[in-house]
Image (cartoon, rainbow, N blue to C red):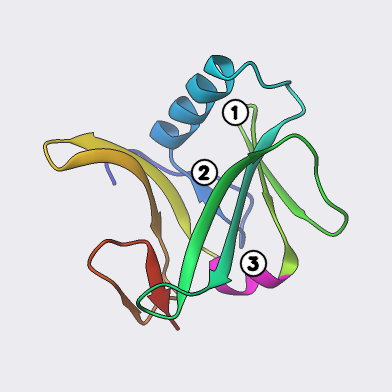
Amino acid sequence: MSDTATSTPGTILISPSAVAEIKRLMTENNLPETAGVRVGVKGGGCSGFSYSLNFDVNQAEGDLVVEVDGVRLFCDPKSMLYLNGTTLDYTSGLQGRGFQFQNPNASSTCGCGESFSV
């Protein structure tokens, strides 16, 4: 990760490049300012768990909300058990572009980086 990530201590970190791309996508999709990105974990994938990343216009009851530079992330408490300390980054380069989860809680990840085990 080339930029410095920022967040509330002990939660989810968001890199500046991820913030910029989320803002661009929210504008492109005409989402309201109250909208955010829902991050989560679900069972499945080749390593046991897979990441989820979607736009959401509403915060759900019990969600942890992380806000960095006007971008809001929503995460349910169960997913936070697996994502605490994770950095959401956005990269673009010769090998493609996209969001990446850099999860210090993952004991192994699959080759595509979209699933993990703890």
Nearer-the-camera pick, 13 or 81:
81
Q: Secondary structure at mark 3?
A: helix
Q: Position of residue 26 (x, y in %)?
A: 58, 23
Q: Which segment did they paint magenta?
A: 78-84
Residue type (three-letter) at the residue carrying disc 2: Thr
Residue 91 rendering spot, x and y as whole percentages = 29, 39
Q: Return the residue nearer the eye: 2 or 115.
A: 115
Position of residue 64 measured from the top left corner of the image (x, y, whole percent): 74, 55
109 over 66 or under it: above or below: below
Report the residue marked by disc 3: 80
Mark 3 surroundings: few (<14), some (14-19) or many (≥20) residues within 10 A = some
Q: Residue at x 44, y 28 (%)?
A: 21
Which label's residue is closer to the chain start, 1 or 3? 1
Please give the residue where the numbered disc 1 appears in the rendered image: 69
Is 80 covered by the magenta stretch? yes
Q: Main secondary structure of the magenta part?
A: helix
